[in-house]
Image (cartoon, helix red, strand yellow):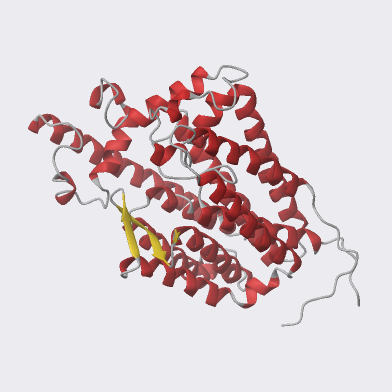
Amino acid sequence: MRYAKYKNLERDWINPACILALVPMGVMSIRSAQLFVHGNQWRGQLVWFALGSIGYLVCARWHYAFFLRYAHWIYLLGIFSLLMLWSPFGLRRYGALRWIGAFGLCVQPAEFAKFSTLIMLAGTLTGNKMGPIRESKSPLIRAFIIFAIPWFLVFLQPDLGSALIFPPILLAMLYISNLSSRFFLAIFTLGVLVLSAITWDIYRYRNFLDTNDISPGEHGGLYQKTSWLPLKDYQRNRIIGFIAPEVVDPHGTGISWNLRQSLISIGSGGFFGKGYGKGMQAQLGYLPKAVSTNDFLFSVLGEERGFLGTSTALLLLSVLIGNTFRIAGLAHDRFGRYLTVGIAVFFLMHVLINMGMTIGLMPITGVPLPFLSCGGSFLIVCCILQGIVQSVYRRRRNVDRDG
């Protein structure tokens, strides 16, 4: 494939500036959360960011059409990485099979699967003209299969948080493909039915607990063996803990512990925060060390930096996401537009779910915060995706081209 030659390629400085402001903020919060245990995850975060920066620069320099050419291979590699979880290299932690360990490294293939699926969906929709549902059946079926395989493998781990990221990316790409509005009406109806089924299942689960006079987590997963929904009982516990924590955990020492401690952390920070290294919730272990540096880093930031610090982080993330949507509008071809919209939705969903769960607006799921939370696989993927956004911007519509 020959790519058009571009000259005088301008760079977008808005997203890189946001990234360079967010990463130090995250590293400092990670270090502060581990002061009492002398953890060194913050150093690892710097190493991962250095590697991610290389990926960013490479992708920003390459023409993004490279990913269209090799979309099938990238997608197959993503599926292969997920299947590797069920090999001897798969690592089970906290009851979930989400990591691959080899040569002293530990990676989370679900993060690469999000990236590879996004690339493949963009490539598939680029090669097909969408319109009325009858005329779009073939590409719709292909897009659904591309989405369903990695989504199902991620759900099996189980990783409900990552599984929640896939559907909005697919729907966003389909929305800008000029697909008939009747399709989205059908999807909305299906969503209502699924939500109703989950609600009924949770109601039956509550009755199961009350009838047997047991509390969540004490029945060894007996209910999930009888339910027709593919949910684990610990996932049901999280939903109930979100809906009615005072009922299932009146003392706040069980399934609602992390949420209660998160709310205490954020609320105690006030407007300016307690100051760097002075947040006690994470350092004293009220926010467990297993989550304080990744899924609940926003809580650490809220306690130490207060409303001012969290608002700054939210503003930077909002600017980064909004500017990514703006660049999508400047893309000079369909593939660039699909790619950038998918990337923007990727970041948007991570921010909405993570911040929503830390302040009690959403059930708790394991979703990290872009460029803030600790996590090498996720950070590298975020950098690569933003490098692709930079590549789309440099070759946008109004760039002068040779020939």
Q: Nearer the viewer, residue 134 or 83?
A: 83
Extreme left residue here?
212
- From the top left corner, tell me how far across and down residue 339 is, in percent: 64, 61
Say above or below: 16 vs 25: below
- From the top left corner, tell me how far across and down residue 171 is, in percent: 53, 54
Say above or below: 389 vs 7: above
Residue lying at 54% horizontally and 20% vertically, measured from the top left = 269
Pick the quarter of the image with the C terminus.
Answer: bottom right
Q: On the rendered structure, is 215 left or right of 338? A: left
Q: Is residue 215 visible?
A: yes
Q: Is residue 182 visible?
A: no
Residue lying at 43% horizontally and 34% vertically, measured from the top left = 362
- From the top left corner, tell me how far across and down residue 254 is, in percent: 26, 30
Q: Quadrant of residue 87?
A: bottom left
Q: Which of 83 and 205 is in front in this view?
A: 83
Q: On the rendered structure, is 386 left or right of 279? A: right
- From the top left corner, tell me how far across and down residue 167 is, in percent: 47, 54
Extreme bottom residue here?
1
Q: Which of 271 and 120 is in front in this view?
A: 271
Q: Which of 11 and 243 is in front in this view?
A: 11
Extreme front residue here?
38
Residue lying at 44% horizontally and 34% vertically, measured from the top left = 357
Pick the quarter of the image with the N terminus.
Answer: bottom right
**How many discs mark residues in the rendered view?**
0
Q: In which quarter of the image is residue 397?
A: bottom right
Q: On the rendered structure, is 43 left or right of 331? A: left
Residue lying at 40% horizontally and 42% vertically, measured from the top left = 365
Q: On the rendered structure, is 394 left or right of 250? A: right
